[in-house]
Image: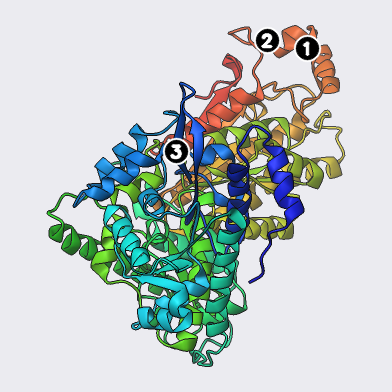
Amino acid sequence: MDSLYTDPDAEACVARYPDLPRDLALRVYTTRLLGSDPRLVLHGGGNTSVKLTLPDLLGVAAEVICVKGSGWDMGTIEPAGLPAVRLDALRKLRERNAVADEDMVKVQRAHLLDPTSPNPSVETLLHAFLPHRFVDHTHSTAVLALVDQPDGEQIAREVYGDAMGVVPFIMPGFALACAAARVYEAKPDVEGLILHKHGIFTFGDDARQSYERMIAMVTRAEERLARGRKVLPAAALPAAVAPLAEVAPIVRGAVALKNAKQEGAWHRLVLDFRTGEAIRTFVDGAELSRYSQAGVVTPDHNIRTKNKPLVVPAPDACGIAAFASAARSAGKRFRDEYRDYFARNNARCGGVKTMLDPAPRVVLVPGLGLFGLGRTKKDARVAADLAEAAVATILDAEAIGRFDALPEADLFDMEYWSLEQAKLGTAKEPPLAGQIAVVTGGAGAIGFATARAFAAAGAEVAILDKDEIAAREAAQRIGGTALAITCDVTDARTVRIAFDRVVEHFGGVDIAISNAGAAWQGRIGEVDEAVLRESFELNFYGHQRVAQNAVRIMQAQKTGGCLLFNASKQAVNPGVNFGPYGLPKAATLLLVRQYALDYGPDGIRSNAVNADRIRSGLLTDEMIAARSRARGVSEKDYMSGNLLGREVTADDVAQAFLAQALALKTTADVTTVDGGNIAAALR
């Protein structure tokens, strides 16, 4: 591992914050260096600090420790992410025999220089009890590979000699801070501390020294691991493994949980797939069931990955039905074992804990790779990142010995530690959390408004549109994890490819909004047959292709789903010279009900929104003018020509689609969004 510290970059960081003390600016700089390397820090793991003198809110100088705050990413940290805490108050705690976690947090918050700052790290006391000006802490995968062994402490002493102290595993907090301080004080010339099955600390008098000691000590671990020669034996795999697009929805369905409080609702997870040489070596190993089930590589991970991943059989391309059955059985077994794990450890803790959901957060698929799982795509990526780090650590550990994690009781205590649970937050989930929505014609007025509404309701959104640039722009406008895919719904092949891409990216499909369409005009007795066929290709068969592909995926998931169709008042109240558009829309209205009839037993709902006169790429200014002339009214009167006298917008249609998606006991419904048109009212 090479040092990335350069004087020009360091000075540039100092210049960027002219009002900060130099040491605090350099602390920001080296924290970012550590946080930008996933071999050292991932998703909130690790922390750094600097001790200095700052004025309090009254302008009085105070000796403080600026330490990484909760919720801040070391790779992108700003000065606000290093809250200042009065150092003398923290060091006074050393005089006590014990400090409860909740009291520790209260003391730290009570002595913040700025009361609006984030909570300081749970390892603040460890930083405070060490005398050094700069202290760095990471969860280096190389160091973890050394210490995640049955004799990990001995290996650490052999590798580091007198350069590093070794601290036995203790839960973070007051007790660990005291133990680490004692190890340091017994040999105050050490350059850092190895925390058994946890990570590494280094320290120094300046930012560069502390950072480069971290790099040097991690490099020693890497050099020791490079001497490992043991190769994992490979398992026998099927001659042909099923593709990701077939496997992902099966896995996703296998880990979904029925919502016991709401009939028809599911607790679904979003997937993030990873593969590569190291991952394949890991998941294809003959002893996968041993080393993958030993536990997490550092207890900081288990709040996001659980202690163990779910392992499913290799998906044989020639036996996908058998794989689906085996995956569901494995998912059930995982949940049952997790409930048993919780029950026995909760009893040990006095029965005061509340169980988290028992679904896995990592799934290993021999022959394919691994999935990270989460209630959002972002959460799934975090789990996948941590799983990749675990793969690297365990492979290195197995190369020099045998991977060995902490005992179950310690892992449970970390997973259900109140201070770790606080990292997950307590915000109420949006109503479509964990669901994946596909919107065709997603770059158009109605499609974009609908995609935006579903994203705001918590769904992961895929925008399908035949205009690639417009689809990308729409996804960028929505932001977050919105996905743009080029798709022409008149082409069956591209529809299949588009839905497979959604599955490969998110893991499945729960809601399909079939919105793409265009309007053809002409007197029905005079229109060319080619025009009518073209309209049917888009305005009927396009809906059929979308629904077929959505149902294909929903049936693999076995968690129900929702089909939503953009119909038109033309389906029930045809307009003059509008037959080429209205006829396929009328057929689509029956299509909606046929899907409701045929797939209701599978929990798949099918509904439509019957909208009228929405300004869009379909109802252009030119068409508004033409339709107004055909009816002999002004354009304004045409657009608001309804019982309410109000123009209906794309957002109104989007809200109707959203309401149908949330109405779990509504199917075969047609919701009219037209401001009131009795002639178009359904019987």
> Which residue shows up at 69% across the image and 62% down it?
4
Quadrant location of residue 119? top left
Gap between marks 1 and 3, in whole Å? 80 Å
Instruction: Say which of 158 and 36 sits in front.
Output: 158
The residue shown at (48%, 38%) is 83
Q: Which residue has dot 2 on it?
A: 641
In this picture, is 586 found above or below 336?
Answer: above
> Spatial distance from mark 1 to mark 2, Cα to Cα?
11 Å
Closer to viewer: mark 1 or mark 2: 2
Q: Distance between the residues labelled 3 and 2?
A: 72 Å
Question: Badge 3 is on which residue?
Answer: 63
Which residue bears the numbered disc 1?
631
| Tag 1: amino acid | Arg
How packed mark 3 is, by other alpha carbons closer than 10 Å (few <14, some 14-19, many 20 or more), is some
Q: Earlier in the sequence, mark 1 or mark 3?
A: 3
Please, which colouring scheme is shown?
rainbow
Which element type, helix, strand or loop, lies under badge 2? loop
Determine whether label 1 and label 2 are within 8 Å by CB: yes
Is disc 3 in contact with disc 2, using a CB cutoff of under 8 Å? Answer: no
Q: Which residue is drawn at 51% across and 44% down?
A: 72
Rendering coords of residue 144 (x, y %): 45, 72
User: Can residue 6 be spotted in the picture?
Assistant: yes
Residue 68 x %, y %: 48, 46
Q: Position of residue 407 (x, y in %)?
A: 27, 72
**Along the line of sight, the residue nearer the viewer: 314 or 578:** 314
Label 1 close to label 3 by CB (< 8 Å): no
Label 2, residues with CA under 10 Å away: few <14, some 14-19, many ≥20: some
